[in-house]
Amino acid sequence: MNDNSSNHDQLERLARRRAGAKMGWYIHATVYVLVNLFLVLLATSRGQDWAMYPLLGWGLGLLIHGAVVFFVAPGGSLYDRLLERERKAMRGGDRR
């Protein structure tokens, strides 16, 4: 197997992993909205306000999940910027 084919295979694996991670987040967000909509309707129909607690707690988890998927994980924008900075530093092009 030549380097070009190996690089293509690695990129394909990364692309599939990134797409899977993003799809996982979209599913998580959809379930969050549907379940919390039900909880809010249930609580308000009984004149209660307890639904805000799972909404906020789970919302924080969803926010962290999204930050990891879209910014921190390999292929995320923050990860890509840091990786490029390290590549430049290793080539001697950036002495920060």
Image (tube, grey):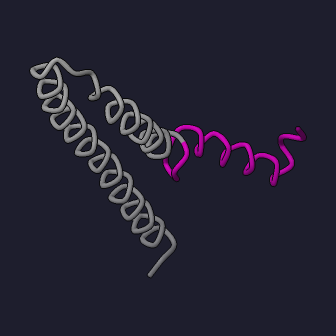
Q: Is residue 70 left or right of residue 19?
A: right
**Residue 30 figure quarter:** top left
Q: Which residue lies furthest to the bottom in this view?
A: 1
- Residue at point 66%, 49% (across, down): 83
Start-end of magenta stretch: 72-96
Viewer-proximal residue among 54 and 15: 54
Q: Quick one: quadrant of the N terminus?
A: bottom left
Residue 44 versus residue 16 in the image, above or below: above
Question: Quadrant of the image for the C terminus?
Answer: top right
> Percent x, y for residue 92?
86, 48
Above or below, comparing residue 41 to residue 96 in the picture? above
Is residue 93 found left or right of 40 in the rendered image? right
Magenta stretch secondary structure, dominant: helix
Which residue is more in the foreground, 14 or 47? Answer: 47
> Residue at horizontal 48%, vertical 41%?
64
Residue 12: image location, x then y, percent: 36, 61
